[in-house]
Image (cartoon, rainbow, N blue to C red):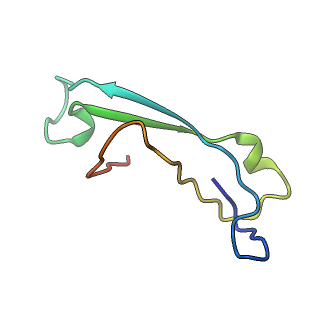
Amino acid sequence: MWDASTDSAGEPSNTSVVDVDVAARRASRAGDSSDPINKAGITLGLNPDAEYFHDPTTEYPVIVDPTISSIGTVYDTYVR
């Protein structure tokens, strides 16, 4: 993730690694079966460092955009 600050080349200058958890999700029998959250798939958990957000040198807005390479080809993302 990175904040709004940039270096002389325009690249982000205040960055931080975001821990990512990838877990298989089983389909739920309860609830509306048309709801994507109840279907089987993968749950992607993002765990940004809270201290980064509290640091007085952090310039908002902050972009959380982790690099994901361990889950293969992804054609769609559902965020709830």
- Does 33 appear above or below 54? above
The residue that appears at 32% across and 26% down in the rendered structure is: 24
The residue that appears at 21% across and 25% down in the rendered structure is: 28
Foreground of the two, 60 or 35:
60
Q: Quadrant of residue 30?
A: top left
45 lies left or right of 10 = left
Foreground of the two, 37 or 10:
10
Horizontal and vertical percent position of residue 1: 63, 53
Horizontal and vertical percent position of residue 14: 76, 58
17 lies left or right of 20 = right
Which residue in the rendered view is the most extreme toward the left? 33
The residue that appears at 65% across and 60% down in the rendered structure is: 62
- Does 44 appear above or below 30? below
Foreground of the two, 74 or 36:
74
Which residue in the rendered view is the most extreme toward the right? 56
Q: How many tags in the picture? A: 0
Horizontal and vertical percent position of residue 79: 37, 48
The residue that appears at 42% across and 36% down in the rendered structure is: 70
- Does 29 appear above or below 71? above
Horizontal and vertical percent position of residue 78: 32, 48
